[in-house]
Image (cartoon, rainbow, N blue to C red):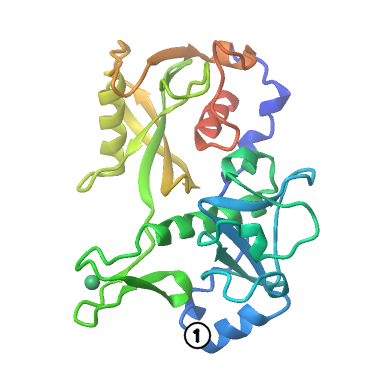
């Protein structure tokens, strides 16, 4: 018998996209090499800049809900930092602005409301999804720039090109172009009829359990990565694997590829180097449970939560 669905899950099935996947902009890829257009946009009063400082985003933390801080060119000190074109919409262009070179980044900008650099994971789940997605995009791009300052081929310095979407080796004999990197990770809800398999890592908040996940390896299909990770972490063999949805997860540089998988075995053998615990949870238990220190669901802005909630709602 199907249990009645609590209100908090009722709208989940209708939701198509995950947190951080809602940036409603045109990425304007064809404009990235248009130097005249770029400098005109950077100076234009309708252009908005989203500052990033050492992996933190600038947020109006006192707004209810917290909001992204959109700055204009006028509010930013000259040569404050490098920019990356994020894209455009009907209202103008959006750039990420890297203030990481400043020990006191707030001194490089002028602003009226109290703004704060913060980890997006602290506030992302509360924010407007479009704004949260823009901040995630900006953070992901700046993280890549910060870690690709040198050419991986010859070791020379690399410099930003194409409005921040390429880093080119400065040695003319090499001149290798390096492109922004995002690491594919599979994340999967394994089910066995009315039960699903959730695990927890030692480092997570008390009681938190989640779906299994792991990085895709070179030379491996996504389906094989799902089966391998589940087997390695829990000893469970899976059969049918189905794609669900994806989520940019720039913490620091992943794209989470969500799947559901049907179990072909049920005896769990946890790999203690990966997980502290893994168990089968009954649908009825999850529907009735309120988060506490013995058991809590994954964070609201994660695709893991979405996979579980969609299964509960299904
Ligand atoms: Zn090089």
According to the image, label 1 marks what residue? 34
State the image quarter where residue 138 is shown: bottom right
State the image quarter where residue 185 is shown: top left
- How packed mark 1 is, by other alpha carbons closer than 10 Å (few <14, some 14-19, many 20 or more), is few
Q: Residue furthest bottom?
A: 36
From the top left corner, tell me how far across and down residue 243 is, in percent.
41, 40
Q: Is residue 21 visible?
A: no
- In the rendered view, does 80 fall on the left or right side of 304? right
The answer as to whether callout 1 falls within 8 Å of ligand 1 is no
Quadrant for the N terminus in the image: top right
Identify the residue at horizontal 36%, vertical 47% (top origin).
Answer: 184
From the top left corner, tell me how far across and down residue 291 is, in percent.
62, 17
Image vertical order of residue 50 relative to residue 45, above or below: above
Q: Secondary structure at mark 1?
A: loop
Q: How many marks?
A: 1
From the top left corner, tell me how far across and down residue 87 is, in percent.
57, 69
From the top left corner, tell me how far across and down residue 276 is, in percent.
37, 16
Image vertical order of residue 299 relative to residue 279, above or below: below
Image vertical order of residue 88 relative to residue 262, above or below: below
- In the rendered view, does 244 fall on the left or right side of 79? left
Identify the residue at horizontal 41%, vertical 43% (top origin).
Answer: 257
Q: Is residue 112 visible?
A: yes
Q: Give the camera-side residue of 21 and 260.
A: 21
Quadrant for the C terminus in the image: top right
Q: Give the camera-side residue of 125 and 284.
A: 125
Q: Quadrant of ligand 1?
A: bottom left
Q: Give the camera-side residue of 152 and 132.
A: 152
């Amino acid at each position: 018998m199907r249990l009645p669905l609590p209100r908090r899950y009722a709208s989940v099935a209708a939701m198509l996209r995950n947190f951080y996947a809602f940036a409603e902009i045109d990425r304007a890829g064809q404009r990235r090499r248009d130097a005249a257009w770029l400098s005109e946009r950077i100076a234009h009063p309708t252009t908005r800049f989203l500052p990033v400082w050492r992996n933190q985003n600038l947020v109006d933390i006192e707004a209810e809900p917290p909001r992204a801080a959109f700055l204009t060119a006028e509010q930013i000190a000259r040569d404050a930092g490098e920019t990356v074109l994020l894209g455009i919409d009907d209202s103008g262009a959006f750039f990420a602005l890297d203030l990481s070179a400043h020990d006191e980044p707030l001194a490089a900008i002028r602003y009226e409301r109290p703004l704060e650099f913060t980890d997006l994971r602290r506030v992302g789940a509360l924010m407007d999804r479009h704004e949260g997605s823009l901040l995630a995009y900006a953070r992901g791009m700046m993280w890549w720039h910060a870690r690709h300052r040198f050419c991986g081929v010859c070791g020379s310095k690399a410099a930003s090109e194409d409005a921040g979407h390429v880093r080119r080796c400065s040695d003319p004999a090499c001149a290798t172009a390096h492109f922004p990197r995002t690491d594919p990770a599979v994340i999967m809800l394994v089910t066995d009829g009315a039960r699903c398999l959730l695990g927890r890592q030692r480092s997570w908040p008390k009681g938190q359990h989640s779906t299994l996940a792991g990085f895709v390896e070179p030379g491996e299909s996504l389906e094989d990565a799902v089966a391998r990770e589940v087997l390695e972490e829990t000893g469970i063999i899976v059969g049918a694997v189905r794609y669900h949805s994806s989520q940019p997860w720039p913490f620091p540089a992943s794209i989470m590829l969500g799947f559901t998988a049907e179990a072909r075995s049920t005896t769990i053998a946890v790999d203690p180097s990966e997980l502290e615990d893994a168990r089968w949870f009954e649908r009825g238990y999850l529907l009735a449970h309120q988060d506490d220190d013995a058991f809590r669901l994954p964070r609201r802005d994660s695709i893991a939560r979405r996979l579980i909630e969609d299964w509960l709602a299904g």
